[in-house]
Amino acid sequence: PEVINGRTHKATVVDLSPWVEYEFRVVASNSVGIGEPSRPSALLKTKAAVPVVAPTNIGGGGGSRSELVITWEPVSEELQNGEGFGYIIMFRPLGSTTWTKAVVASVESSKYIYRNESITPLSPFEVKVGVYNNEGEGTLSSISIIYSGEDEPQMAPAGASALSVSAATIEVSWLPIPWNRHTGRVLGYEVRDW
C-alpha cells in the first residue's frame, strides 16, 4: 500500500474488484518502525459492475443426432461482478452471417445443448460464450469451431470374407468404411455370426 503523509486522515483505495466485501486496517509508522494495526473496519461491499471476464475452454461436440453440445469453464464467483449472473451462448453454422443467441441463467452451468431437426450430422458451428449480470452484458469469448452430433453409420462394411483357420477358429475380414460427413467417425465394428 501507498504510504500516506502523517497529517492526512483519509485515503481513497483504488483497483478493488467489483461486488466484493472488503475490510480495512490502518497502520501507523515512523522512523523507528511500524505500530500495531487498527481494528478492522466494518465489512463494506464494492458496487456491482458489468462482468469483464469471458468463460474459457469453450468446447463441446458429440451428443445425439440433431444436437449441438456447447461446454465451457464456469466463471468463478469473484469475477461475476454482481447479482443475476449468467451466460450468453452465441452460435451459427460455419459460413452463415446470422447468430443464434441463447441465455443460460444458472451460475453453475457449464453446458448448453441446442436441438434442431434441421442440423445435419457433423456440421461445423462457430460458437462464442459470454457473460452477463444485472448491470449488463459483458465480454464474449473468442470463436471456437464445434461440430454437431453424429448419426449412426449409414453404410455397411463391404468385402466381408471368412477363412477357416482351425477346427474352432475362423478369421473374418472386411474393408473399412471411409470417413465422410455422412458416415461420421467409425469407432468400432461388430462381428456377428450365426
Image (tube, rainbow, N blue to C red):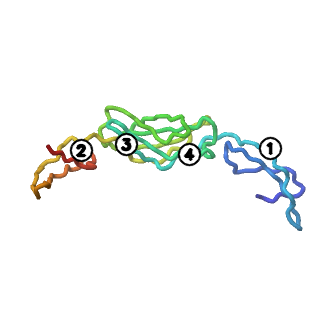
Q: CA distance from mark 2 to mark 1?
A: 64 Å
Which tag, 4 or 3, sits closer to the chain's start?
Answer: 4
- Tell me which amino acid carries mark 1: Ala
Provide the secondary structure element on which disc 2 rests.
loop
Q: Position of 163 compared to 34: left or right?
A: left
Q: Residue furthest front?
A: 167
Q: Residues within 10 Å of mark 2 (few under 14, many from 20)?
A: some
Find numbered disc 3 in the image and state the secondary structure of the residue it sits on: strand
Amino acid type shown at disc 3: Phe
Mark 3 and mark 2: Cα distance apart in space: 19 Å
Distance between the Cα atoms at labels 4 and 3? 23 Å
> 10 Å neighbourhood of mark 1: few (<14), some, or many (≥20)?
few
**Residue 30: x and y, percent?**
88, 64
Q: Quadrant of residue 137?
A: top right
Residue 183 - label: 2
Q: Are marks 4 and 3 in contact (CB under 8 Å)?
A: no
Query: Which numbered disc, 3 or 1, marks the residue that appears first in the sequence?
Result: 1
Does residue 101 sit above or below 3 in this rendering?
above
* Sooner in the amino-acid sequence: mark 4 or mark 2: 4
Q: Dot 1 corresponds to which residue?
A: 42
**In what element is the residue under mark 1?**
loop
Q: Earlier in the sequence, mark 2 or mark 1?
A: 1
- Quadrant position of residue 86: top right
Q: Residues within 10 Å of mark 4 (few under 14, many from 20)?
A: many
Quarter assignment of residue 61: top left
Amino acid type, residue under disc 2 in the picture: Thr
Q: Which residue is mark 4?
A: 75
Residue identifier under label 3: 125
Q: Where does residue 82 sit, x and y in percent of width and height? A: 64, 39
Camera-side mark, 3 or 1:
1
Residue 67 in picture, x, y percent from top left: 36, 37
